[in-house]
Each structure stands twice: as C-alpha cells, then as structure tokens.
Amino acid sequence: MPSNTESPSLEHRFDFSISKDEVQKVLDARLKRIAKTAKVHGFRPGKAPLKVIAQKHGKDVRLEVIGEMLEKNFNTASQDKHFDVIGQPRFEEQQENDETIGFSAVFEVYPEIILGDLSQVNVERPVIDVQDSDVDNTLQVLRKQHARYETVVRPVELGDRVHVDYQGTIDSVKFEGGSAENIALIVGEGKLLKDFEESIIGMSQGQNKTFEVTFPENYHGKELAGKLAVFEVEVNSVEMPVLPEIDAEFAKSLGVSDGDTEKMRLGVKQNIEWELSKRIRDKVKNQVLQSLLDKTEFEVPKSLLNNEAERLLENTRQSFKDKGVEFDDEMYKPELFHGKAENRVRLGLIFEKLMKVHKFKSDPEQVLRIVKEMAQQYENPDEVVKWHYDSPERLKDIEAVSLEDNIVMWVLQQVNVVSKPMTFDEIMKMGLT
C-alpha cells in the first residue's frame, strides 16, 4: 500500500513501489498479443519473433504498462483515503532496485469549503423612478447621435467634426501610427488622445500648428507609454453638428413607423427602464458575489488557479488578434491574471458547494426567459432564440447563467437588502466605474 505524506496545503504525495516482475509479466503478455498480428518487414504478418517485437515495441509498451499500474495504485489509494482529487497526479520516479521501481504521485485535493455567515451582510439595491427629464436628456443624446454636419468658416469648437492631416515624432523620429491624412474626428469624442483633440480647438481651416502631447503611462502601446511626442497638424475642414428636430421624421429614424412622437417617448422610456433594470441587477449581483468571497475563506488549489490564469491569458491573446493588435508575450504573463483568476476559481468552488448543499438547478422556463431577454437586443429576436436552442452547447452557457441567478436569489434571502434611492445619472455612471 502506498504511503501518504501530507502538508498543511492542499498538495499531497503518495509513494509507490511497483514490482518489476509484475511489470515484466504484463509486458510479456501484451507483446505476445501484439506479435499475433504485427506486420514487420521481412516477416509474414503475425510471424515475427517475439524478440523482434520487443525491440520494436518494448519501450513504448513498458511505459504504457507502468502508467496503467501507477494509475490503478493511485486510484485505489486515493479512494481508500477518501481524497477528492483535482485533475491528474504528477508521477515522479524515485529509487529503483533489483525488485521494484519507486514512484511518487504528487497531487492536489479540493479544499474544505465552509460557507460563511451572510446574515450581517448589507446589499444595496438602487431604486429609481424614470422621470420625463430623463427621457428628455436621453432624446438629446439621440439627437447628437443622429446629427448631420455642415461646413463652417470659423475656428474649431468642441463637438465639431474636423478633417486633419498630422505627423508625429518622438525625439525627431517618426513612429508607427503617428501619422494620418485627412482623418475625420469629432473633437471631444475621445477617438484620439484628449490633449491632442483639445489642441485642435481654436484652429481654422488651412491652419497649421505644432504642439506636444505626452502619452499616458498606461497607454496600450508600451513603446509609446509615457513618451513625449511632437505633432504637426493641418486642419483641412471644419464642420459643425446640426441636430435634428424632435418631430415625426426623427421618430421614424428611431423606428416608430407612423412618426408618433408620443410613441417615440414611450419607447425611449421603456429602453431606459430596461437598461436601468439591467444595471441594477448587475450592481446587486456584484455585491452578492463579493459577499460570498468575503465570507467564505479557503485555500485556492494552485492547479486550478494556474489553469484559469492561462485561460484568461489565452482569451486576452485572442482578443488582441481579433482587433488586429499585436500581442506582447513579454508583457502579458499568466501571473498578471492571478488576481482575477483566483476570484473566479473561488466563486466556482463556492457555487459547487452551494449546489451540493442546496440542490440548485437551472429552470427551463427561466432559461427561455433569459434567452428571450438577450434576443431583444438583436434585429430578429426569434432567430436568436432559435439559434440558441439549436445547439445544446450554446444552451449550456445560458443554463449556467440561470443557475448563477438562482444562487444569487438564494443569497439575497440570507442578507439584508437595503433600498438606496438613486438618480438616473448615478445609475448610468455605475457601468463606468
């Protein structure tokens, strides 16, 4: 029977001894079975001598036999000890003598998770009544989004659309992405660096200007981060925004077929309420998840942490690739994602514990409701619903959301939910922090 070495952490070690005679016995039997059908050059199928078969397949088959024996011994030992093993063990060869081969199996077990007391936790639930002024303000935002632009002969103002040529240098050397011709930008929108856009304000068509801009320390291109650049800029044209009137034509542009402005306002109010409802749910959910993290302490298995960090790293790499941005392997290492990965692993293990204790399951009606709600964001909601239900794999993602929602609802019954009156602007800014 293997001996067991334990440490205060989740890592354990079993020491094994495997009989060489037993290995050889199984190896010989397996090689004889292979020899019956083996095709070897110079011999008829199944007629090659056992010595030739051993020379050709012996090494690989021996490793296979030893691997099976290790796995069998490990499974028996871990079951006898009632260990809840994470993943596969790592086998390390130790001492070997004339009779046995020594191995150690290094592995991790799941931590003991004791759910914390949530009764003293306060969760704030934002409360708001949408006012006519909120609808008015949203309509003003929509007007700006539907603005047309007219050429003007005057200096650039905030909100104008300008076409510019620019050339940037750092230490008198041009740099990648530092130049463009006749690029259009709305001043103040944030398409380019804030200091760059603000420096254009006051310029006129045909005017040239040279100014300095310092790239932020956290700029996504690390070769430019914190660097001082000099830009030469020429304004080719200046256009001012002309906002549409709030009338039937504007209503039609927002999807109200008959141009009824009251229907338009009602639709805008419903959209506001839907967005607010989503943000409130997210705000409450984030507090619930944080309360579970704060109140449930346990050691995080290193293997799960490392696997999740690697997954987050790969997702980031793919995101850069999708955007056409070069990924810096030297800058982005798995360790960079350990904080986020730890929270994800911890929540995953807490959820598993809650599901075992309280038998949480995803509800089919709830799943359908979630899918339909998601589908409302698209032009053809029915097709989106069908797309989800055509694939069990896609539906699994929604079932996971449903299960998570059920856990959140259970936690809300354990904590103190406090209503917090908020304004429209306050709730909308929650998504920016």
Image (cartoon, grey):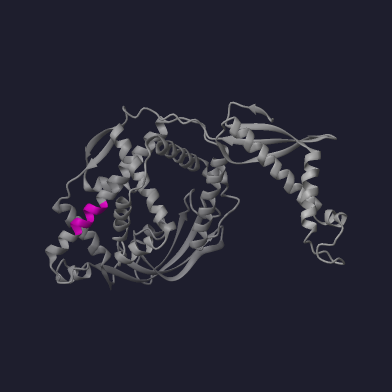
From this view, report whether residue 318 is shown above or below residue 95.
Answer: below
Q: Residue at x 67, y 32 (%)?
A: 14
Membership of 381 in magenta stretch: no
Nearest the viewer among 112 and 327 is: 112
Q: In the rendered view, would you say 337 is above or below 121?
A: below
Q: Position of residue 349 (x, y in %)?
A: 46, 38
- The quadrant of the image that shows the N terminus is top right
Quarter of the picture holding the C terminus: top left
Residue 375's spot in the image, x, y percent?
Answer: 31, 60
Quarter of the image holding residue 24?
top right
Question: In the visual, does 135 lie left or right of 102?
Answer: left
User: Is residue 269 shown in magenta?
Assistant: yes
Left/right placement of residue 305 relative to residue 46 reads: left
Q: Residue drawn 34% across and 29% down? A: 118
- Pick whichever, 371 or 428, lies toward us: 371
Q: What count of labels does the image hold?
A: 0
Against 375, is 28 above or below? above
From the viewer's perspective, is 24 left or right of 353?
Answer: right
Q: Residue at x 22, y 67 (%)?
A: 254
Stretch in magenta: 268-275
The answer to which of 7 and 34 lies nearer the viewer is 34
Percent of width and height locating residue 100: 80, 35
- Image location (x, y in percent) of residue 352: 44, 39
